[in-house]
Amino acid sequence: MNKKQNPYRLYLTENQMPKQYYNLRADMKELPEPMLNPNTKKEATLEDLLPVFCKELAKQELDNETRYVDIPKEVQEMYRIYRPSPLIRAYNLEKYLDTPAKIYYKFEGNNTSGSHKLNSAIAQVYYAKQEGIKHLTTETGAGQWGTALSEACSYFNIPLSVYMVKSSYEQKPFRKDIMRTFGANVIASPSDTTSVGRKILEKHPNTTGSLGCAISEAVEKAVTTPNSKYVLGSVLNQVLLHQSIIGLECETAFKILDEYPDIIIGCAGGGSNLGGLIAPFMRDKIKGKHNPRIIAVEPASCPSLTRGKYTYDYCDTGKMTPLAKMYTLGCDFIPSPDHAGGLRYHGMSPIISKLYHDGYIEAVSTKQTDVFKAAILFAQKETIFPAPESSHAIKVAIGEALRCKETGEEKTILFGLTGTGYFDMTAYSSYLDGTMSDYIPEDEELEKSFPNII
Ligand SMILES: *Cc1c(COP(=O)(O)O)cnc(C)c1O
């Protein structure tokens, strides 16, 4: 038994850190369906993407062939400020669960944004700066993406407007102030600063907003402001590409440990951390070298993979972005306001959707009270205060470890601990006070917002 030989925390050296991103699309047997121009319904071209995205990022979005993409020097320099992120062995949790399984987690919360989102924010802002962009816009739901982008914009000195979902803006005032610390202009969405925001406010004056609606406002602001671009923190192929740094670091770390994960678990909102975490392991699976189980975990109240439709849909409520084929609840879907646990996006990364559709990935959904129960156990045993989003993965990792206890199997489990939950105290309070409810939409309710575009 070498159970105690491995370190609690494994950090790569600077030299061992990845110098290139890995593009999983280059190794997929079947590619995700192409994005479509929403007007012509024809395959989207580079020109179609340029009004919304920076050129280099638009190219990355469409590039299904380049296997490795150099990480620009300036981006590597900022990565070194807060990376590598540790691969941690959850010895104490294992002991508590009395499981023969080894539980590892990759902790991405060690930066001010409190999540993995900074990995892509830095790359996106860098490319925008290279292109001479003078202003960026984005949306943020829970606030992590907005914070990450604010940090990156401050580092590269580009002004930023953040459309923040109104419910978060009100529930998480301190989030807003962190973004302001980094110089961002934060606007509650829906707002009267855009025509799509004004339209939504007219129809639903009391709405608490949605991520889709905030995206639409940010896109509109970008296309109507000179030299401005919109950047998105999840879902897109380019974001998964940048997040591959998570998986690549894990891959090297497991080589050092001389182990390989049998089960890989990630929470799935838009699919970026999961896509990044699994990238090199999925390559091995596709090539038949290893066969890890890969599990996506989503909230029962926003179940795009487990109950959505695999079809073309807009990435935003404003219907301005190209159409992507993905598992989706429909871009008009607004999760219940009772839902506090993050991961509230209506769709799912086209790459993750395709892999799920082709049977490479399993998906499960879980109730938020179960998620918070797991979060609290994890905090007590591992001393990291997890984000509710990440806790979806914790919940399922614990379940798998307990299953190993029943079967006596010594499986190696890896999960993505995407971030910390310090700004989710309202959600933690409601769980601790016993007022948190579990909302699971009925089929008829989901039917109402399913897309019917193609
Ligand atoms: C945004 C976020 C997620 C979900 O986004 P993905 O694109 O699905 O990774 C998960 N965890 C944390 C902490 C986040 O901030």
Image (spheres, rainbow, N blue to C red):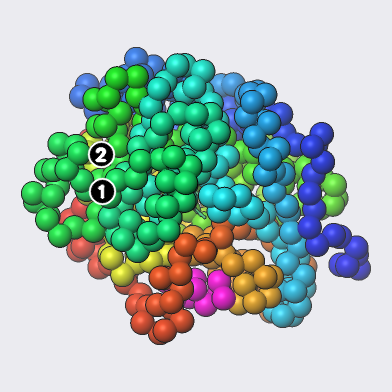
Residue 229 visible (yes or no): yes
Q: Which residue is mark 2?
A: 217
| Residue at disc 2, CB closer than 8 Å to ligand 1 | no
Image side of residue 321 versus residue 430, left or right: left
Spatial CA distance of label 2 from label 1 is: 8 Å
Q: Are marks 2 and 1 in contact (CB under 8 Å)?
A: yes
**251, above or below 329, in the image:** above
As drawn, the residue found furthest toward the left would be 202
Residue plotted at (53% across, 49% down): 113
Which residue is at the front of the view, 283 or 134?
A: 134
Q: Position of residue 168 (x, y in %)?
A: 34, 58
Residue plotted at (31% across, 52% down): 165
Image side of residue 234 versus residue 186, left or right: right
Magenta stretch, main secondary structure, is helix
Report the amino acid beneath label 2: Glu
Q: Which residue is mark 1?
A: 189
Which residue is at the front of the view, 153 or 125?
A: 153
**337, above or below 126, in the image:** below
Report the amino acid beneath label 1: Ser
Quarter occupied by residue 146: top left
Boundaries of the magenta span: 366-376
**114, above or below 148, in the image:** below
Q: Quadrant of the C terminus?
A: top left
